[in-house]
Amino acid sequence: LTPPFSVSLFIPRMQSQQYLQERRKLAAVFLAFIFILAAVGTAEAGKKEKPEKKVKKSDCGEWQWSVCVPTSGDCGLGTREGTRTGAECKQTMKTQRCKIPCNWKKQFGAECKYQFQAWGECDLNTALKTRTGSLKRALHNADCQKTVTISKPCGKLTKPKPQGRS
């Protein structure tokens, strides 16, 4: 069977103005689709898949830390021991590096940080000057005094010169 029209006759008739407009619309839609597909593919390629973290509720307690023990001498670098409890804790003990300032008074502990006032006047009876410090922060749940007072020698005292004999 032959169609009632020839293919060569159909093409020139279909290339009317309306056909060309429809063809342009289809091409524009196709190009827009390709553009969107490329944009989504690029955006997805830039994302890294994050492995899902297993969130386990831990029955482990908070770490409790010992005081910092210097490696040598009474200040400088040292270590402290940490412990925690819990039936399913994988790690119940660990050691942490720490530092004790060398100019810090041992009686306050390295974990207690104070804000000090200016030094007071020299007490001529004791040859000492004092100052008071208020607790600024306690590291690792240290048990610190709220206020402390420290003293130090006044240094060279000006002694009254003996009066000459008249």
Image (tube, rainbow, N blue to C red):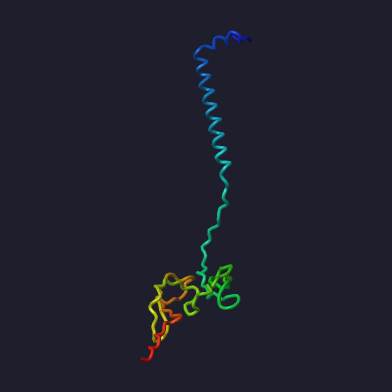
Say whether residue 149 is left or right of residue 30. left
Task: Choose between 11 and 137: the one closer to the eye.
Answer: 137
> Residue at point 44% right, 76% down?
144
Is 92 placed above or below 26 here?
below
In the picture as drawn, the residue positioned furthest to the front comes out as 166
In the picture as drawn, the residue positioned furthest to the left comes out as 166
Task: Choose between 162 and 107: the one closer to the eye.
Answer: 162
Is 84 placed above or below 159 here?
above
Number of numbered discs overlaid on the protein picture: 0
Q: Position of residue 58 (x, y in %)?
A: 52, 65
In the picture as drawn, the residue positioned furthest to the bottom comes out as 165
> Residue at point 56% right, 34% down?
38
In the picture as drawn, the residue positioned furthest to the right comes out as 1
Q: Position of residue 31 (x, y in %)?
A: 54, 27
Q: Position of residue 142 (x, y in %)?
A: 47, 74
User: In which quadrant is the N terminus drawn?
Assistant: top right
User: In which quadrant is the C terminus drawn?
Assistant: bottom left
> Residue at point 50% right, 79% down?
106
Is 166 placed above or below 123 here?
below
